[in-house]
Image (cartoon, rainbow, N blue to C red):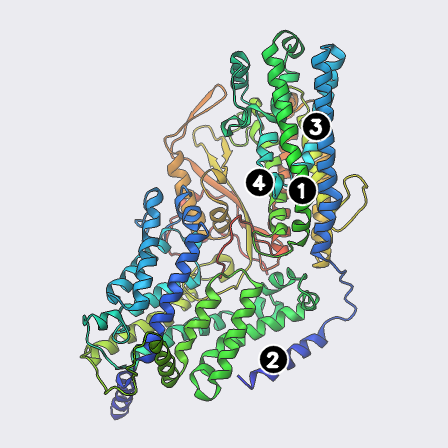
């Protein structure tokens, strides 16, 4: 009893202990800038049109199929809102409304189509969600300047620690996920990606070697597992951060991973000391001729939700974050082959999967069958993603069935009224440098299988 | 972290010493492959097709001056020759060929013969409009010069002759632009060895796959009824009027095989190709599977003696065998080969993860 109380007290003290607001303010500005950069980049590359306006069909998330895209160019609207609200987050103007709007728009766009799922998009969604609840606008913000909120120089420790926790989860789980034989013993899929770089002077030939792929794999795994701990310790922090920068620059140079390296390089600054952030903030404020450094000010802090309520919420969030990546344990079979419980688990760059899927429409009345021309319904990216992901295969099957049901097809002089058709598929998939194997056999009528979270028995077994 | 560095170094060195020293893995260089493909295959085939179009143009001029049976047959031969050479050129739908929309302008089939007939009847048309891709190109010439009574119509209808001349002139003019642009694009192509989906190497691998799939679907699958509940659709046959569809299929597969093996278009010499890349990646079994796959398809195509339209009427099981060979081959080149190269099958740049 006493032990529990002591523990609970010390946790409580740790979380509610007052610390400088400087790291939080710096994080608001830095992360806001990343949001702005990421959104502008997305729009300028023409992806709004390519990924959201042009496709005819979208792969919704289970339970979120009601999330639909806006008609035509209206799809630019959430992106415009994101650009404006990211700016508002940076300067702290109507901060809570701004970050909430950004979170809603960003998550809305992500929910439209799982073909585009990326771990770092999920990370951005979570981080924006967290930021909604943090007092990141209570200093050096327009909200303070226009006296909309009381200025605050101290915040409870948990407001900083929760950001560090989220970053820690990303790294640590990415490290755990790498503890598998393909990654550690075969150096795959890194081997495939590294060998493609033989044009790099000096290093190119080395990247062809299997031992090099294995060395890269081990280094990546150790980095992911331990970097957070070295960032947390004051003694190793500076060196660890150099490692962060180096690691992400290497991945940025070698692999097509977009903004992810920049997000991580800048977000991990949150691990630096209060002192570091105070100096940085001070310099930033001087740029704006604002000279009320935090050190000089007396400690001001605004009322905060009761510690108990906060502690429970944080505990629930932490449990959720720690449990979700392990949900794959509920499924039998190979995780990479079946992809049951794969997303939302920080499995970053863990597999190279390529598939070829041929779907067949079978008219029950005549027994005749047609090959489906996937390009008629899906973009190249969607087709490519769907071919290797079982849940998307089933979604596509249901779409094909609904599309053809009741259709009258005229071929030559013949006429067919399609009713309740069967859909079969023959799919081959290659995983992490292995030769392709049969993924789905043509014998199944895939319309008979439910699209749910249960184990999918219709997949062919994976042979090592 | 300070303790990690020596650990990693030791690890790297230990693993380094463990590697087989008698590993005979042959050297390979993507830049050499690109240089070989552009210098020995793309430029020569573009040059040959350009010459074929000039010959076609000359034959047509000769015919329009003197509309004899012999001159008519001269044009027909020139069309067939260009159509066969086109099978090599159309693989390279990137760079100047894509930016100028050449693959659809020259290679779209089947033609909309009703539209062509109406244009000839009225004598007013704009062949450059995008909606007219199925009224131009080699397929239109196949119709105009090989349909029944073609010679008679050419001799008696001035509009018909003018239309045919316009189609030829359009191809000559547009392809001259490609020939010209490729001379400067070659350097860009040769240097673009990167792995992003917009690098020339990625585009090249993707287009290679796409061209093979197109051959499978459009040259055989669609007319054979594979996408129409087994009901044959002869109106979709490529080069239906000249009846050279199976020759075109064979030539298309041969061209893809030569590109795969890096075999020079005019020299016939074996240079760096996808085969060497696979061998470098220690996948020589896959290499022989693919090479034999190509041979199997070519032999099967060769075994048909009649036109595709005639064969569709009498040899359904045999055509099914041919189609299965094509279908199975897609898995080897698109899934096995492409994934080994670390190339993304997509046309857009992406965010990865």
Q: Label 2 crowding class (10 Å Cα cut-off): few <14, some 14-19, many 20+?
A: some
Distance from Cα at disc 2 to Cα at disc 1: 47 Å
Labels 3 & 4 near each other (Cβ < 8 A): no
Could you tell me which secondary element the residue under label 2 belongs to?
Answer: helix
Labels 2 & 4 near each other (Cβ < 8 A): no
Q: Is residue B314 left or right of residue A309?
A: right
**Residue for badge 2:** B8
Disc 4 sits on a residue from what chain? B
> In the image, are marks 2 and 1 on the same chain?
yes
Q: Residue A358: x percent and y percent?
A: 53, 42
> In the image, are marks 1 and 3 on the same chain?
yes
Could you tell me which secondary element the residue under label 3 belongs to?
Answer: helix
Above or below residue A404? Residue A99 is below
Identified at 65% across, 33% down, the residue is B175
- Front residue of A328/B77: it is B77
Could you tell me which secondary element the residue under label 1 belongs to?
Answer: helix
**Residue for badge 3:** B53
Q: Residue B182: x percent and y percent?
A: 67, 42
Above or below residue A176? Residue A4 is below
> In the image, are marks 3 and 4 on the same chain?
yes
Res. B312 visible in picture? no
Q: Residue A165: x percent and y percent?
A: 37, 76
Could you tell me which secondary element the residue under label 4 belongs to?
Answer: helix
- Front residue of A192/B141: it is B141
**Residue for badge 1:** B182
**Residue for badge 4:** B99
Distance from Cα at disc 4 to Cα at disc 1: 11 Å
Which comes sooner in the sequence, label 2 or label 3? 2
Q: Residue A83: x percent and y percent?
A: 34, 58
């Amino acid at each position: 009893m006493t032990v529990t109380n002591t523990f609970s007290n010390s946790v409580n003290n740790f979380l509610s202990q007052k610390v400088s607001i400087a790291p939080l303010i710096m994080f608001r500005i830095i992360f806001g800038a990343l949001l702005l950069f990421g959104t502008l980049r997305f729009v300028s590359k023409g992806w709004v049109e390519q990924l959201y306006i042009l496709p005819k069909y979208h792969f919704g998330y289970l339970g979120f199929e009601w999330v639909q895209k806006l008609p035509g160019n209206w799809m630019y609207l959430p992106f415009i809102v994101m650009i404006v609200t990211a700016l508002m987050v940076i300067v702290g103007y109507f901060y809570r409304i701004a970050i909430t709007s950004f979170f809603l728009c960003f998550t809305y766009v992500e929910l439209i189509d799982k073909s585009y799922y990326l771990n770092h998009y999920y990370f951005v969604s979570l981080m924006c969600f967290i930021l909604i609840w943090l007092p990141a606008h209570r200093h050096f913000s327009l909200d303070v300047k226009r006296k909309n909120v009381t200025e605050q120089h101290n915040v409870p420790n948990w407001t900083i620690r929760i950001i560090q926790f989220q970053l820690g989860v990303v790294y640590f789980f990415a490290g755990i996920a790498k503890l598998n034989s393909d990654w550690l013993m075969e150096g795959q899929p890194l081997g495939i990606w590294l060998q493609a770089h033989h044009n790099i002077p000096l290093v190119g030939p080395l990247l062809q070697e299997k031992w090099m792929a294995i060395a890269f794999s081990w280094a990546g795994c150790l980095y992911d597992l331990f970097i957070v701990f070295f960032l947390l310790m004051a003694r190793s922090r500076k060196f660890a951060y150099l490692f962060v920068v180096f690691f992400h620059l290497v991945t940025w140079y070698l692999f097509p991973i977009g903004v992810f390296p920049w997000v991580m390089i800048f977000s991990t600054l949150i691990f630096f000391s209060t002192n570091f952030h105070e100096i940085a903030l001070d310099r930033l404020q001087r740029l704006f001729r604002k000279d009320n450094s935090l050190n000089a000010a007396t400690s001001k802090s605004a009322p905060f939700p009761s510690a108990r309520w906060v502690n429970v919420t944080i505990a629930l969030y932490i449990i959720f974050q720690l449990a979700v990546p392990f949900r794959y344990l509920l499924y039998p079979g190979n995780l990479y082959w079946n992809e049951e419980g794969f997303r939302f688990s920080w499995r970053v760059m863990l597999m190279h999967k390529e598939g070829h899927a041929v779907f067949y429409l079978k008219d029950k009345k005549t027994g005749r069958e047609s090959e489906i021309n996937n390009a008629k319904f899906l973009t190249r990216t969607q087709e490519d993603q769907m071919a290797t992901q079982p849940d998307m295969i089933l979604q596509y099957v249901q779409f094909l069935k609904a599309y053809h049901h009741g259709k009258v097809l005229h071929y030559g002089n013949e006429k067919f009224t399609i009713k309740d058709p069967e859909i079969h598929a023959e799919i081959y998939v290659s995983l992490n440098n292995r030769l392709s194997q049969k993924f789905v056999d043509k014998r199944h009528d895939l319309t008979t299988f439910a699209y749910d979270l249960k184990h999918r028995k219709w997949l062919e077994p994976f042979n090592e | 972290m300070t303790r990690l560095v020596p650990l990693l170094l030791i690890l790297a060195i230990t693993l380094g010493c463990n590697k087989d020293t008698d590993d005979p893995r042959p050297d390979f260089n993507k830049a050499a492959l690109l240089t070989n493909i552009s210098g020995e295959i793309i430029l020569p085939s573009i040059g040959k097709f350009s010459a074929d179009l000039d010959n076609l143009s000359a034959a047509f001029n000769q015919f329009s001056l003197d509309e004899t049976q012999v001159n008519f047959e001269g044009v027909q031969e020139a069309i067939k020759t260009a159509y066969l050479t086109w099978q090599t050129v159309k693989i390279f739908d990137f760079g100047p060929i894509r930016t100028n929309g050449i693959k659809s302008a020259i290679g779209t089939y089947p033609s909309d013969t009703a539209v062509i007939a109406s244009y000839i009847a009225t004598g007013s048309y704009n062949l450059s409009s995008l909606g007219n891709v199925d009224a131009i190109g080699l397929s239109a010439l196949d119709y105009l010069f090989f349909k029944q009574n073609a010679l008679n119509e050419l001799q008696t209808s001035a509009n018909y002759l003018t239309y045919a001349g316009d189609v030829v002139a359009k191809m000559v003019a547009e392809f001259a632009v490609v020939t010209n642009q490729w001379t400067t694009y070659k350097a860009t192509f040769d240097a673009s060895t990167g792995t992003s989906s917009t690098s020339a190497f990625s585009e090249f691998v993707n287009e290679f796959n796409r061209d093979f799939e197109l051959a499978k679907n459009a040259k055989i699958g669609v007319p054979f009824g594979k996408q129409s509940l087994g009901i044959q659709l002869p109106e979709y046959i490529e080069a239906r009027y000249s009846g050279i569809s199976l020759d075109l299929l064979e030539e298309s597969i041969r061209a893809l095989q030569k590109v795969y093996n890096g075999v020079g278009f005019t020299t016939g010499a074996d240079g760096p190709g996808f085969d060497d890349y696979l061998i470098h990646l220690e996948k020589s079994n896959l290499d022989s599977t693919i090479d034999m796959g190509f041979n199997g398809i070519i032999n099967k195509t060769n075994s048909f003696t009649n036109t595709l339209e005639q064969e569709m009427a009498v040899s359904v099981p045999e055509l099914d065998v041919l189609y299965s060979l094509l279908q199975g081959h897609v898995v080897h080149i698109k899934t096995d080969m492409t994934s080994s190269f670390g190339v993304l099958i997509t046309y857009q740049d992406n965010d990865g993860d």
